[in-house]
Image (cartoon, rainbow, N blue to C red):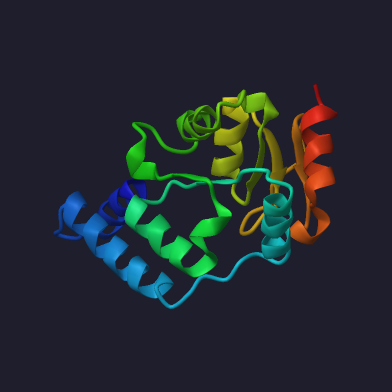
């Protein structure tokens, strides 16, 4: 949000401080997501499958805690054993710190973690942390690479797929 707010101030010349605009943008965004956040196709099924098999999931976001909490109100706090917000780490995506924090929170080596990401920034962060990545591009294309699989939809992903991603690429 800070980078986005800074960019908006730079390109518009708005007479507002970075802190003021960040608060304004977060307030508006929070209000909008308060009406509900849809999950990607296949996400609810995958989260349910992970829970049935007692595989913990984390939500790792560059968004601030207050935004994550609103999203969780919509999609269900129970799906995630751990959450990491952008304002809870010193450096956010594309830096690896958020994913390293999540892995440490689970007591897991990053290379034993499968990450599902929809942006190039998130993919870069997860890969820099040493995690295996499933990319589900949402806005811009993401190319396949070593340690990364690109899918069209989470409908293509299940627990067996994630296990193979983590164990088959060592």
Q: Nearer the viewer, residue 43 or 127?
A: 43
Q: Tell me if residue 18 comes above or below residue 48 in the rendering.
A: above
State the quadrant of the C terminus: top right
What percent of the width, then of the height, locates residue 151?
A: 78, 52
Count every numbered label the image shows and give the total.
0
Residue at point 63%, 54% (across, down): 140
What percent of the width, then of the height, locates residue 44?
A: 67, 64
Q: Tell me if residue 12 comes above or below residue 65 in the rendering.
A: below
What percent of the width, then of the height, locates residue 94?
A: 50, 36
Question: Can residue 39 be spotted in the picture?
Answer: yes
The image quadrant that residue 153 belongs to is bottom right
Residue at point 30%, 53% (across, down): 5
Residue at point 14%, 59% (across, down): 15
The image quadrant that residue 125 belongs to is top right
The image quadrant that residue 166 belongs to is top right
Residue at point 73%, 62% (across, down): 45
Q: Is residue 13 left or right of residue 132?
A: left
Q: Is residue 5 left or right of residue 62?
A: left
Q: Nearer the viewer, residue 64 or 19?
A: 64
Question: Can residue 13 be spotted in the picture?
Answer: no
What percent of the width, then of the height, locates residue 11?
A: 31, 55
Q: Is residue 32 left or right of residue 152?
A: left
Q: Is residue 163 left or right of residue 106?
A: right
């Amino acid at each position: 949000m800070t980078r986005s707010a800074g960019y908006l101030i730079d390109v518009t010349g708005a007479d507002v401080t970075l802190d003021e605009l960040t608060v304004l943008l977060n307030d508006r965004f929070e209000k909008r997501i308060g009406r509900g956040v849809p999950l990607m196709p296949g996400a609810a099924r995958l989260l349910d499958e992970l829970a049935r098999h007692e595989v913990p999931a984390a939500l790792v976001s560059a968004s601030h805690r207050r935004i994550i909490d609103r999203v969780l109100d919509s999609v269900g706090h129970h799906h995630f054993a751990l959450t990491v917000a952008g304002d809870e780490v010193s450096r956010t995506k594309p830096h690896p710190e958020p994913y390293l924090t999540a892995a440490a929170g689970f007591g897991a080596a990053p290379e034993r973690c499968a990450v599902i990401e929809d942006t190039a920034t998130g993919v870069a962060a997860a890969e820099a942390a040493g995690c295996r990545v499933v990319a589900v591009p949402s806005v811009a294309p993401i190319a396949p690479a070593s340690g990364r699989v690109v899918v069209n939809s989470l409908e293509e992903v299940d627990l067996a797929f994630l296990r193979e991603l983590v164990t088959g690429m060592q």
